[in-house]
Amino acid sequence: MRVVFMGNNRVGQVLLRWLVERGQLPVGLVVHPAARAKFRNEMIEVVKPFKIPVWDADRLKTPQMLEALRAMKPDLIMSVLFGYILPKQVLELPRAGAINLHNGYLPYNAGSFANVWSIVERTPAGATLHYMDEGIDTGDIIARKEVPISPDDTGATIYAKIEDAQISLFKETWDSMIDGTAGRSKQDMSLRTYHKMADTDSIDLIELDRCYKARELIDILRARTFSPHRGAYFVEGGRRYYVSITIEAMKT
């Protein structure tokens, strides 16, 4: 199986290393450009001894990169926390399709900050492997893994839980994805929720004279307690004050 791996973040690095250690070296690696990458150098180091081609994702729509990808004759494109939309010409290249590992429990929380919106909107949190199409997180689902949300969870702790779920889901499903035995089911779009990265602007400003239900306010504050993002804030005397919270469950 000739795989082009497109990845970012810690999960991308962990899973790329796992594949290489299993002897399943990708035929090509696509990473985020340095200005918007996490674990870029670590991922490049994983494949460096094998001298496989490495490309920056901002070249995806160039004729030169499209031709290079075509020359790879990929059977599968694997996207892991990859923050770029693949053009149709790229999606059509792999014989077995393109698969994405998403950090939300689709069809809930497509798009950005799935960890945040799972708390604020009280929707299921988790990880999803799905086929990619021209939409954003709209393709058929291969497998999902849900993670529980506890009253003392924050955006940071849910993010960590989802990372663990992504890694285990990928490892559990990988063999079936490459041998063609993985399941495939349509998403129920009546349940779909979707958010852009900028949508958190609508919840971050805490209006001091507005009435909130206690649960609503606590959910916003804990969801936005998510370093390094500054999160929720209020304004007093023309100055902005950021708020994060700690929630501790009583020991029984």
Image (cartoon, rainbow, N blue to C red):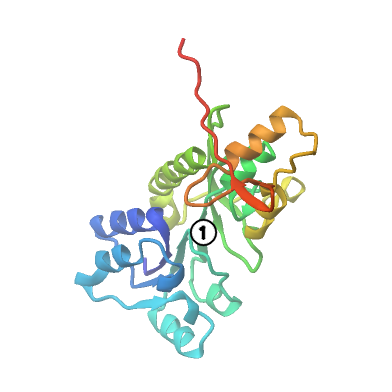
Q: Residue furthest top?
A: 252
**Is 136 located above or below residue 243 in the figure?**
below
- Give residue 213's position: percent from left, percent from top: 76, 30
Residue appearing at x 71%, y 28% in the figure: 214
**Is 119 located above or below residue 49 in the figure?**
above
Q: Is residue 143 left or right of residue 38?
A: right
Residue 140 found in image quarter: bottom right
Q: Nearer the viewer, residue 152 or 169?
A: 152
- Give residue 219's position: percent from left, percent from top: 64, 35
Q: Can you identify the residue that label 1 sits on?
A: 100
Residue appearing at x 53%, y 76% in the figure: 90
Neighbour tally class for label 1: few under 14, some 14-19, many 20 plus, Cα within 10 Å: many
Residue 112 found in image quarter: bottom right
Residue 224 found in image quarter: top right
| Residue 47 in view, yes or no | yes
Amino acid under label 1?
A: Asn
Instruction: Assign a secondary structure to mark 1.
Output: strand
- Give residue 22's position: percent from left, percent from top: 25, 55
Q: Nearer the viewer, residue 181 or 208?
A: 208
| Residue 124 in view, yes or no | no
**Is 1 located above or below residue 140 in the figure?**
below
Q: Is residue 103 left or right of residue 173?
A: right
Q: Is residue 25 left or right of residue 212?
A: left
- Give residue 20's position: percent from left, percent from top: 27, 60
Q: Is residue 19 left or right of residue 93?
A: left
Q: Nearer the viewer, residue 57 or 221?
A: 221
Q: Residue furthest front?
A: 237
> Which quadrant is the N terminus positioned in?
bottom left
Count of residue discs: 1
